[in-house]
Amino acid sequence: MNPSARPNPEPLLSVEDMRVRFATEDGVVHAVDGVSFDLRPGEILGIVGESGSGKSVTAQTLMGLTRSPNASISGSVRFHGTDLVTASEEQLQSIRGREISMVFQDPMTSLNPVYRVGAQIIEQIEAHKEIGDDEAKERAVELLASVGIPNAKERVDNYPYEFSGGMRQRAMIAMALALEPRILIADEPTTALDVTIQAQIMALIQRLNEERGLAVILITHDLGVIAEVADRVLVMYAGQIVEEGSLDDIFYDPQHPYTWGLLGSLTRLDQPPPDRLPQIGGQPPSLLAPPGGCRFRPRCPHAFEKCTELPALEERLPAANSHADRCWLEPSEKREKREVEGRIGLGAPA
Amino acid sequence: MEGMGQFILRRLIGMVAVLFAISVLVFLIFNVIPNSDPAQRIGGKNANEQLINRINEDWGFNDPLPEQYVTMMKKVFTGDLVSYQNQRNVLDQIEKGIPVTFSLCIGAGIIWFVLGVVFGYLSAIRAGRATDRALTILALIGISLPVFWLGEMLLYYVANKAGLFPLGDYVKFTEDPLQWANHLILPWFTLSVLFIGFYSRLLRSNMLDVMDEDYVRTARAKGLPERQVRLKHVLRNSLIPIITLFGLDFGAVIGGGAILTETVYNLPGVGLYAGQSVASLDLPPLIAVTMFGAFFIVLLNTIVDIAYAYLDPRIRLGTQAA
């Protein structure tokens, strides 16, 4: 864990009640529904959730990348006195890539196949800085070397197809870091890579976080990745944050049954393997017409009458230190109910 | 780039092979497949017995087929080919027609490519809005207009009634460049309209597809100005298939697609020559014009392949893999 992530310094980025809706042919999709969180300087904030939980849309909306005639976005994203939700395109352009950078899920398709890797890095530098071509190219070589690309001097003239998946993701990270941004948003940066490369990429992100105090928003569905690097974790379900807390809070004292389910479906090497890997029954809800009350109610074996009312995201434990969740159960009940065969799990449907 | 040199060489060898195959096909189609006396057909309607005997001897129609093929190719390539109807040397006629056909096709090609790209681009970046709708309707009209009809209408209304342009015919560029252009404006437009409509629709849909690509999102996330994202990332990548198509269409237009336009505007190009030869069932010119057309289509195909490898570096990978 990064020691510079002290509790409650002035947040770098502050998201308030962000809502993103898309008009589609089938109706209005409520992709993100009232998300609020802070990103503190130098921390790695993990956002976990299933596909369709709204985590990627949340991340892209931070940079204004979801803007379109079919999208309606409300709430605020405060960054250095600017609200990125209402900022003009010009304001966003000067922030994108310079203050806040983003790395995407699939490195195979995230680089333009017809330009050299170096040219794509240079293009980013030149978009924000008055700089000569030679100098920009030198910088590109430095950047590639700093993310661990061997022979960066020659590799800078390669085309993306001449790079492996892991190298492309390194190149994407090099590009994202070109202007020493304060925030890196990594949207499933390792999902498309094989496991050994995943570990290398995560180690790289962690190193940059420690060496440069780079704040990172790490979006993933892989709790293993989160466990390795995150300082704080947001758990998202159906467009809402259902639990928020420090890494230890989430892994050792999870309060929301959905989080239990996620943890329960992890394979653990330190315990005998179960006959059948537990899973969360049912399907994630349609975001066209999300269920009333608690969004997780239809899949939750512990649901009771009160769950027809949507619980707020708030601190429910007596000694909670910014550990918040959306579940009506009493903390003492939860401790009992999440115990399944000696480990944390969702339990069988009642 | 040694990969590129090898690639070009392979393409050129391929081109020669294709041309050979085409020449064999032309030979078979004209001289072997039709179930009648080839000398009779080549001689034309008014050929007498004496002429037919001479043709039989000239073309070696009593020799085995491979020899007949060689004799015919010799005639085509040495400029020996003569029309037996008007005694004119076929290659001379084609040579005379080439500057006219090229003037028409190159001018039209530039117009349709530039306007196709401009309209397609505007349509794509304003997708769904009024500009896009208007351009869509225009494109559909353009695609639906037959060349012979459009040509006649323009001649009648714009050239004849309004008197804005000359009534067809051709003036050599070397004689008077202004008159050359003035005489070609209507033919250029007539030949381009279909392609402008086609290309703008195709570019529009390519661009809309490319706009959804991850690398376009990356370009935006880098903080590039929207204009640069559209031109360098969306348009550049969307143009690759358009350029391929352009090469093929341009080859096809030179190789015979301009026949109607040349005929309507009475431009003495290769197309008009071909049209007249068809009308009088004069085979020697048709053999040569068919080869001429095939040559340009294959040549442009090769150029397209090479340009493609230049535009999309991934294509060159094939040379190393092979």
Image (cartoon, coloured by chain):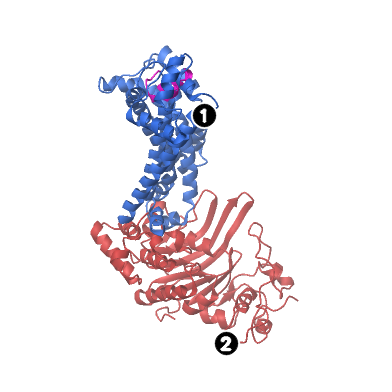
Chain colours: A red, B blue
Contact, CB < 8 Å: mark 2 with mark 1? no
Q: Which residue is more in the foreground, B206 or B292?
A: B292
Residue A343 found in image quarter: bottom right
Image-based side of B305 in relation to A72, left or right: left
Amino acid bearing label 2:
Asp
Residue B120, quarter of the rendered image? top left
Camera-nearest residue between A13 and A25: A25
Question: To which residue does mark 2 refer?
Answer: A270
Residue A8, x across and y down, in percent? 45, 76
Measured as percent of width and height from the top left, residue B278 is found at 47, 21
- Residue extending farthest to the right is A350
Tag 1: amino acid: Ile
Q: Judging from the image, what secondary structure is the residue with disc 1 in?
A: helix
The one of A84 and B228 positioned closer to us in this rendering: B228
Left or right: A151 with respect to B63? left
Q: CA distance from mark 2 to mark 1?
A: 71 Å
Instruction: Identify the image quadrant of the N terminus of chain B.
Output: bottom left
- In the depicted structure, whether residue A149 falls above or below residue B307: below
Q: Chain of mark 2?
A: A
Chain under disc 1: B
Q: Residue at x 49, y 63 (%)?
A: A59
Residue A79 visible, this angle: no
Question: Magenta span has B268?
Answer: yes
Residue at mark 1: B141
Provide residue B175's location: percent of width, then percent of height: 25, 19
Look at the image and tell me whether residue A162 can be seen: yes
Q: Which residues are magenta?
A: B266-285
Farthest-out residue, top: B161
- Name the image quarter holding the C terminus of chain B: bottom left
